[in-house]
Structures are given as C-alpha cells and as structure tokens.
Amino acid sequence: MLHGGHGNWRHWARNVGPLSRTRRLLVPDMPGFGESGETPRADLPGLVEILARSMARLPLDHLDLVGFSFGALVAAHLATHSALGQMKIERMALLGPAGHGGPRRMTQALVDWRRCESPQELAMAMHHNLAAFMIAEPTRSTAKR
C-alpha cells in the first residue's frame, strides 16, 4: 500500500485494521517520506527503482499493489519495473492516480509535516493539510485532531 505525496504510511491508518483481518499488509513509508530518511535519488524513476529492488528481495512470488494519489502513480510504474524479476503483480488498485483533477486552488499554505517534532504536532499538520488540500469545505472534515 503506497501513500500519497503529502504524507506517509498513516494515509492508510484506518484501512490497516479491517484489511489485515484477511490479508498480509506491507504499508511502508516510501523513500524520502515519513520516517524513511532521505533517498539518494528523489525523482520518480529513482523512487520506483528503490522500491522495485526492495520488493524483489521479499520472499514472495506475487503481490497486490494499492496506491493513493502520488502512490498510485508510483504503483503504476512499479508494476512493470524489470527489477521485480519473477514477482507477479496479481491485482492493482489505483486511487486518484491523476491527482486531484483540475487546477489546484490552494486557499491556504500547507504545513511542512517533515519538521514536526512530536506525534501531536504531526497529527495537527496532517489534519491541516488534509483539510487545506483535499476537502472542499474544511469545516465538514470529520478527521480527528
């Protein structure tokens, strides 16, 4: 499960419990995001290369890919990467792979979540960014602060 470009594995926090009842989940921070640390090559081909080589080392012969927003773009490229070797991608779900559609109309600046120093500060930053970037009417957001 690959998260969007303004977050980390926690994009999937509400999905992990229900989905893990019937599936084995791998929910990483992509290279350069969350707690993964910096990546030597931060462009899309470099990110896909790192993920493909990492996945190829897993003791699996097949897997399903799920990607949200930027993670969907990464998943689409990842599914055909030669470094996967014999690993077969059986199913893929791409959620919002074209981004948010249409021109961005930012009404407020996003908070740089990479500079948060506590879990509470990170949660507030994520809530703010979700409301600013993805919710048409932020006052209607039911996300917990």
Image (tube, helix red, strand yellow):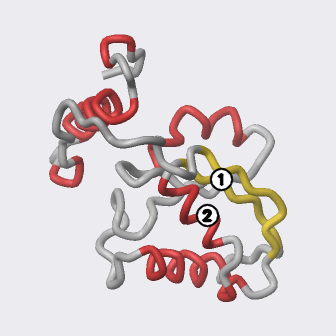
Q: Position of residue 87 (x, y in %)?
A: 78, 78
The answer to which image quadrant residue 128 occupies is top left
Label 1 secondary element: strand
Residue at image location 50% in from the left, 80% down from the top: 50
- Label 1 crowding class (10 Å Cα cut-off): few <14, some 14-19, many 20+? some
Q: What residue type is labelled 2?
A: Ala
52 versus 131 height, above or below: below
Residue at image location 81% in from the left, 85% down from the top: 86
Q: In this view, does 125 lie to the left or right of 27?
A: left
Q: In this view, does 136 lie to the left or right of 112?
A: right
The answer to which image quadrant residue 90 occupies is bottom right
Camera-side residue of 131 and 14: 131
Residue at image location 71% in from the left, 50% down from the top: 93
State how far apart marks 2 and 1 are (Cα): 7 Å
Q: Which residue in the protein does label 1 denote?
A: 66
Label 2 secondary element: helix
Camera-side residue of 5 and 25: 5
Camera-side residue of 32 and 130: 130
Residue at image location 40% in from the left, 21% down from the top: 143
Q: Which residue in the protein does label 2 denote?
A: 75
Q: Quadrant of the C terminus?
A: top left
- Label 2 crowding class (10 Å Cα cut-off): few <14, some 14-19, many 20+? many
